[in-house]
Structure formats: structure tokens, C-alpha cells
Amino acid sequence: MFLSQGSFGKPRSDVDSEMVRDTLDGYLSALRKNGQICGEALHAVSGGSAIAYAYLVRPDSITRQYHSRYGIQDLDGVCELFGQEPSWQVLADEIPADFPDVRTASSLCLFPSAFDGQSPVCSMDTWDRFPTYLIPIDNDECERLCFWSREYNRMDDIWLSSGELEVPAYEQLASPSSLLSKQGRKLALAVESALHIPVYYFLMRYYGRGECESERRCPGCGKHWRRDTDTELTHFWNFPFRCEQCRLVSQFASASYDDSYAHIGEFQTKS
């Protein structure tokens, strides 16, 4: 990510501050939902000119060619209001000469970042995150990835807060049949169909069954999914549990000594 300053210029004299604010809010929101910027952008009018600060995913992610159809509409509104396209300056001393290509990954994983707005599409080889605006999916699918990622992080926050909704939130994160997981797995399938690269869905695993943890079966199909990896993993993404059929991955339980809710996310035999 690269902190950048956007300069929009002075708005037309016949518009009020509320219209300026709404126009900037709409445009920057479209960029965020398309995966071009990370997190909430800040903007203000200083000395009569509008400026904004935002984290760009890549130095060129703000160019028009990467805009969604919604972003183009909002950019046209910006140009009509300010009489010009905004210019952006990257506020960083070191900028990489190139960035990894998503098509070089052998497999991908849908795993949200703790930082709001970062792409949830990761390489399972290097853990690089690939911008969603570069994935050849529909603009609406791209926005759904943004919304799903934010909802995932919201559930994660609720679970960590350990309140009355702790268990329901954990179930959303750990069960392949939860609404959150169903939405995520559908999006993972859309990305896989677009790139023709396997895309796995990450299932959280906190509560476990101690020494029996390594014997648990895939919660999707009930088949063996334990891979031959070291118990002490060097890299988190070297998931010890992976099911190619169900496109699910998971890790060893963080609290393997506590089986209070170990049944959540485990294979359930249909009665």
C-alpha cells in the first residue's frame, strides 16, 4: 500500500460544500469497493482546493483504465464539478519496480486482511495479495468481494470481543455452511472461474480436540484432508488441512485443549 495525496483543484463557484463532499465521498467509495484504494480515504477543502489522502494498492491503481463502470461515472462527476481529473502523488520514497502477477500463482486462497480494504485474494505460494480490480470478474462481483471481506472482519472483531455473540460469530468464521462461508465460497468459485487457478476458502479453527485434532475430516465432504506438513509450520499459509474437492483449507486449532465448541466446523453426518 502507498499513502498518496489526490489533488482535485477548485470546485465550480456555483456549488456548495455539501455537494463537494458528497461527490468526493461517492468517488472515493467507488475506488475502495473496486479494490483500488484501501480503507477509508480522508478529504477536505484547503485554500479553496479539494485534496484527499488514501492508501493506493499500487502506484498506478488510481488510473482510469482500472476504474469500474461505477467509478467511471463518479469520476465523470468529479471532472464536471472541478473541471479536471484529479492528480495523485505517491508519498513514498521507495516504490517497487514491478509487482507479482496473479496468474503466476499455483493456487489462491480467499483470506481477508486485518487492514480494511486490502484484497482477500492471496497466493498460497508466497502469500502476496492480488488487487481485486485486476481480476477479470464483473464489477458487481468485485464489490461483493469488498463487502464480504468487511463482513468477515466484522465477525472476527465480534468473536474477539468475547461477548454474547462470541459463539455465533465464531460459527460464521469456522463453519463451511454458515452464511458468511457460503458467500465467500461462491466468490472464490467466481475468481477461480475467471483465472482458471484453484481458489481455496479458509476456515478458522480455534477450538480443537487435542491429540485427535490431526484426525479430523474435511467438514465439507468428510474425507481425509490432512496433508504431510510439519506440525510446527514456518508459514501460516502452509495449511496442514486442505481438501481439493471442496476447495477448503484450515489450520490446527489454536486452543486444542478446549473442545467446548470443537464440533463447530467439523463434518456432520446427516441423520
Image (cartoon, rainbow, N blue to C red):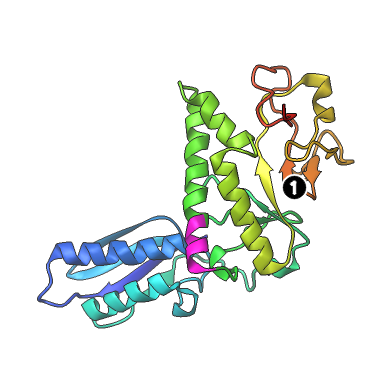
- Left/right placement of residue 197 relative to residue 149 reads right
Identify the element where label 1 is drawn. loop
Residue 13 against residue 270 in the figure, above or below: below
- Left/right placement of residue 148 relative to residue 124 reads left
Q: What is the magenta range?
A: 138-144
Of residues 144 and 177, the one drawn nearer to the viewer in this rendering:
177
**Residue 148 in sight:** yes
Mark 1 residue crowding within 10 angstroms, few (<14) / some (14–19) / many (20+): some
Q: The C terminus lies in which quarter of the figure?
A: top right
**Residue 100 in sight:** no
Image quadrant assignment for residue 175 = top right
Residue 248 against residue 27 in the figure, above or below: above
Residue 217: % across, % down: 80, 33
| Residue 140 shown in magenta | yes
Image quadrant assignment for residue 42 = bottom left
Image quadrant assignment for residue 18 = bottom left
Of residues 189 and 231, the one drawn nearer to the viewer in this rendering:
189
* Residue that lies at the very extreme toward the left in this rendered image: 14
Residue 21: % across, % down: 22, 62
Which residue, given by chain and number where applicable, does mark 1 sit on? 246
Q: What secondary structure prevails in the magenta region? A: helix
Q: Residue at x 38, y 76 (%)?
A: 72
Kind of residue indicated by mark 1? Cys
| Residue 14 shown in magenta | no
* Residue that lies at the very extreme toward the bottom in this rendered image: 83
Q: Residue at x 63, y 34 (%)?
A: 174
Residue 265 against residue 40 in the figure, above or below: above
